[in-house]
Image: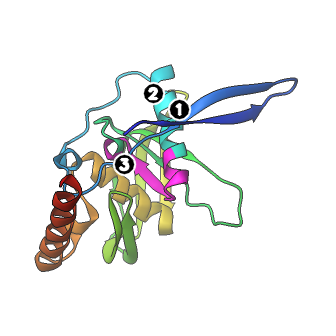
Amino acid sequence: MTDLAYLSCSIGKKDALWEAMTIKPLIILPDPVLRQVSKPVEQVDSEITRLADDMLETMYDAPGIGLAAIQIGVPRRLLVIDVSKEDEENKPMVFINPEIVGASDERSTYEEGCLSIPDYYAEVERPAMVAVSYVDREGKQQTIQADGLLATCLQHEIDHLNGVLFIDHISRLKREMVIKKFTKAARSRAV
């Protein structure tokens, strides 16, 4: 599959800067790549910020609210999120080497879906609030306190970096049915 190049315009004070962004193909269950544990990003450089931009473009195109680098076949500890509402301006967030450093005892349940498991949704219970330590796209260490949808999305995407899928949080029977369905679909696509 070839990458689709798109042009994005970012308006500066006096001129317009055009740069190509690329929509990447998504890795779909049952691809074993999704079970890989991602390696830390050692340096935030132009390659990593470019990857983050491509991931955001891919996520918006899908459309989704979160994407881990492993979902486009890059085993690096990098994820992007935008939980802004449809009628709001986009609020993209980039998390490099994110790590959950605290979680509440209080739990919340959200219906989750995944770009790598298209058209399947299930209720997943997770901590209602988390503290996440990460490096931002400028290379600065940050910590964010998150609750609600952002907390759920951060936990979902960090799971991806550890080779864990949201279906690992549902019953074994449901998980096996989902895996069987996607394995069968993958076989029929290969024929």
Q: Separation of disc 3 and disc 1 at Cα? A: 22 Å
Q: Would you say the residues marked 2 and 3 are in contact, meaning their CB atoms lie under 8 Å apart?
A: no
Q: Residues within 10 Å of mark 1 (few under 14, many from 20)?
A: some
User: Visible in this render: residue 81?
Assistant: no
How would you rate the neighbour count of disc 3 (Cα within 10 Å): few for under 14, some for 14-19, many for 20 or more? some
Upstream in the sequence, badge 1 or badge 2? 2
Q: Nearer the viewer, residue 29 or 76?
A: 29
Rendered image quadrant of residue 9: top right
Upstream in the sequence, badge 3 or badge 1?
A: 3
What range of the chain is rendered magenta?
Answer: 58-71
Residue name at image x 54 percent, y 44 percent = 57
Residue 144 in view here: yes
The dot on residue 125 is none
Per the image, the residue denoted by label 3 is 26
Q: Would residue 59 be found to the left or right of residue 38 on screen?
A: right
Q: Position of residue 190 (x, y in %)?
A: 19, 53
Residue 150 location (% of width, % of height): 49, 61
Three-letter amino acid code of the residue under disc 2: Ile
Residue at 33% x, 38% y: name it: 77
Indicate the amino acid at tag 3.
Leu
User: Residue at the location (28% across, 64% down)?
Assistant: 166
Q: Earlier in the sequence, mark 2 or mark 3?
A: 3
Numbered tag placed on residue 48 in the rendering:
2
Residue 81, image x, y percentages: 50, 52
Q: Which residue is mark 1?
A: 137
